[in-house]
Amino acid sequence: MWTCSNCGRVFEKTKQPHSCRRVPLEQHFKNKEQAKELFDCLVEQIDGKIGKCKVISLPCCIHLFGKYDFLAALPKQDRLEIRFNLHRTLDDPRLKQSVPASISAIKNCIYITTVEEIDKELIGWLDEAFYLKS
């Protein structure tokens, strides 16, 4: 693992090309109060039930890091879109999209619209993603 000395992001490859540019976290939630409530609840659940994570706010989205980069959050007006890798495509009606991320990982995309949707099943998937090295 390699940590960029400029921005603090962790990568699998040494000198991984990337942008060190960051934006304030609150910029992602401007006029998106529902997404902010969902994001705060999600991070609280992850920290309490899976493990502490580091939040990194990039221009494109918000990344959550445990030992690895395990989740991207994209705040929307009425929901929080999350993307995370697993070794499989989820077979669940909540799945909005899945795409290959690598030879062994599938990026699964889910929309969260209520705090009740941050349930035991979702936390189980995120627990799996938290420890997945893809």
Image (spheres, rainbow, N blue to C red):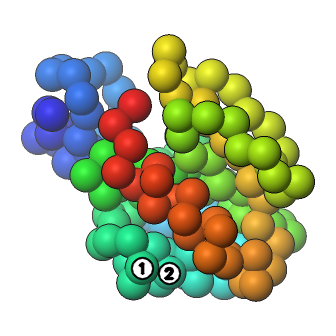
- Mark linked to residue 34: none
Disc 2 or disc 1, which is closer to the eye?
1
Identify the image quadrant of the N terminus. Answer: top left
Is the residue 55 above or below the residue 34 in the image?
A: above
Q: Which image quarter: residue 119? A: bottom right
Residue drawn at the location 39% of the way across and 63% of the way down: 55
Q: Which image quarter: residue 27? A: bottom right
Residue drawn at the location 31% of the way across and 57% of the way down: 66
- Residue 61 shows in this picture: no
CB of mark 2 within 8 Å of CB of mark 1?
Answer: yes
- Residue 25 shows in this picture: yes
Is the residue 37 above or below the residue 78 in the image?
A: below
Q: Position of residue 54 (x, y in %)?
A: 32, 64
Please name the amino acid that badge 1 sits on.
Lys
Secondary element at tag 2? helix
| Separation of residues labelled 2 and 1 (CA atoms) | 6 Å
Question: Count of labels shown?
Answer: 2
Read off the residue under disc 2.
Answer: 45
Identify the image quadrant of the C terminus. Answer: top left
Residue drawn at the location 54% of the way across and 40% of the way down: 86
Q: Is residue 35 left or right of residue 107?
A: right
Please name the amino acid that badge 2 sits on.
Gln
Read off the residue under disc 1.
Answer: 49
**Mark 1 Cα within 10 Å, few/some/many (few <14, many 20+)?**
few
Q: Position of residue 19 (x, y in %)?
A: 37, 32
Secondary element at tag 1? helix
Q: Is residue 11 left or right of residue 120?
A: left
Residue drawn at the location 55% of the way across and 65% of the way down: 124
